[in-house]
Amino acid sequence: GKSATFSVTIKTPEIVDYTFVSPSKTTYQIGEEFSNAGFSLVANYENGVSVNVTDQCTISGFQASEAGKFELTFTYKDFVKVIQYEGEEPKLDYIAVLWPTKTTYFVGDAFDKSGMVVTAHYDNNTTADVTSQCTLSGFDSETAGTKTVTATFNGKSATFSVTIKTPEIVD
């Protein structure tokens, strides 16, 4: 029998390029969590094989603590991709008023907002006490009757009623 000896070199295929698909969400409200939905990274090798490496990619730079434009960095081996994303303030949905403690007044009394709380409700399910930042209108104690008081903050309003009475003369 005859035999032959030869050398075999096994070469690991090299990555020739990547297919990167950005996350579908590029705008975040303050306090919102990062979502990688829609994101994928595929390594394409010289032998024609493509491997999804999305789960092995490192994502850094995300922060949602303030409004502005920011960069998000995706890294895998020698691949680095930087994309822009935006942080924005949540949008005001509505305001609600917890009525003040005093809702009955006599003619000539001044308005007392003790106990009143105006709460802003935002589209990211957060709230904020905006009592000191709202404007009040509609209180008029010059005449008796029921008066509607309106609290307004950033274009949103909420109302409550107060009663103005004429002082009774007691003998």
Image: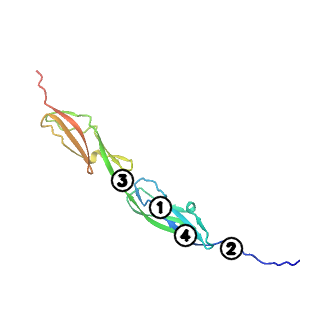
Q: Please tell me which of labels 1 and 4 falls first in the chain.
A: 4
* Marker disc for residue 90: 3
- The crowd level at tag 2 (other Cα within 10 Å; few <14, some 14-19, many 20+) is few
- Residue 114 to residue 155: above or below: above
Tag 1 near tag 2, CB within 8 Å: no
Instruction: Identify which residue is drawn at 36% across, 50% down.
Output: 123
Q: Please tell me which of labels 4 and 2 falls first in the chain.
A: 2
Say which amino acid is labelled 2: Lys
The quarter in which the N terminus is drawn is bottom right
Q: Please tell me which of labels 3 and 1 falls first in the chain.
A: 1
Residue that mark 2 sits on: 11
Q: Please tell me which of labels 1 and 2 falls first in the chain.
A: 2
- The crowd level at tag 4 (other Cα within 10 Å; few <14, some 14-19, many 20+) is some
- Residue 89 horizontal/vertical position (percent): 36, 55
* Marker disc for residue 109: none
Say which amino acid is labelled 4: Tyr
Closer to us: mark 3 or mark 1? 1
Instruction: Identify which residue is drawn at 22% across, 37% down.
Output: 161
Give the total number of marks visible in the rendering: 4
Residue 50 quadrant: bottom right
Residue that mark 4 sits on: 18
Q: Secondary structure at mark 1?
A: loop
Residue that mark 1 sits on: 23
- The crowd level at tag 3 (other Cα within 10 Å; few <14, some 14-19, many 20+) is some
